[in-house]
Image (cartoon, grey):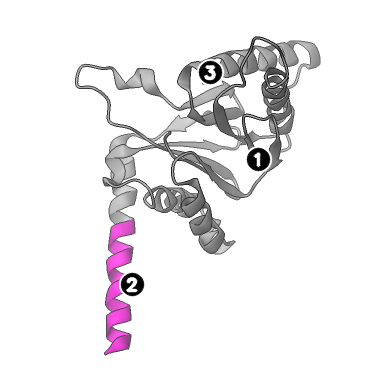
Amino acid sequence: MDGVVGVRGRDIVVLGVEKKSVAKLQDERTVRKICALDDNVCMAFAGLTADARIVINRARVECQSHRLTVEDPVTVEYITRYIASLKQRYTQSNGRRPFGISALIVGFDFDGTPRLYQTDPSGTYHAWKANAIGRGAKSVREFLEKNYTDEAIETDDLTIKLVIKALLEVVQSGGKNIELAVMRRDQPLKILNPEEIEKYVAEIEKEKEENEKKKQKKAS
């Protein structure tokens, strides 16, 4: 189960996913773990991809029917509650098994507020400032608890770096095994390309080295 990290910034929400290396002849676009549900909401999941596909398709239909009925996009809590209710129904019906996925759902409400929610297979959901699911979630969450501050999310770049740093707690081979998506207010979901991610990773490594040098100077 791949690691997934979500962080809510001031005017941005960022999702990061540990990307498993794909087979040489496989098209890696078909193994995305981050999907848009509507213009203002997207979701990343850890768990069974086939189960996630069902949940994502149902959620997308709900987003569209909400737009047609109410003439407004869904709020992030509304679609999270819908997904959580769907999961919960599958825990108590005969002949069905629960959905084997946890999900982080992020987006913006129509008043421009960034949101981050997490749901688990039992159908519970909670709002978070930052959270991790999947492989190594406990150690990543501990990292976020220590490092999530107002200063750490002051700018969009700092928020993106915080997500990458958190993922590097469990991802061994640097930026090439990380997939990142950012959503800004009134802008569509943007998947960062590998070059952009490598640029951030290089900056993080440089900052680390400078901090080490400072520590050594103090020690001497």
Looking at the rendering, in which quadrant would you find the C terminus?
A: bottom left
The amino acid type, in three-letter code, at marker 2 is Asn
**Residue that extends furthest to the left in the rendered view of this protein:** 24
Camera-side residue: 100 or 168?
100
SS for callout 2: helix
The amino acid type, in three-letter code, at marker 1 is Arg
Camera-side residue: 120 or 198?
120
Distance from disc 1 to disc 3, alpha carbons, whole Å, reads 24 Å
- Name above or below for residue 210 compared with residue 191: below
Specify the label residue 51 is tagged with: 3
The amino acid type, in three-letter code, at marker 3 is Asp
Specify the label residue 115 is tagged with: 1
Quarter of the image where one finds residue 210:
bottom left
Q: Earlier in the sequence, mark 1 or mark 3?
A: 3
- Name above or below for residue 8 compared with residue 118: below
CB under 8 Å between discs 2 and 3: no
Image location (x, y in percent) of residue 105? 60, 33
**Residue that extends furthest to the right in the rendered view of this protein:** 70
Image location (x, y in percent) of residue 154? 55, 58
Q: Main secondary structure of the magenta part?
A: helix
User: What is the span of residues highlighted in magenta in the rendered image?
Assistant: 204-220
Residue behind mark 2: 211
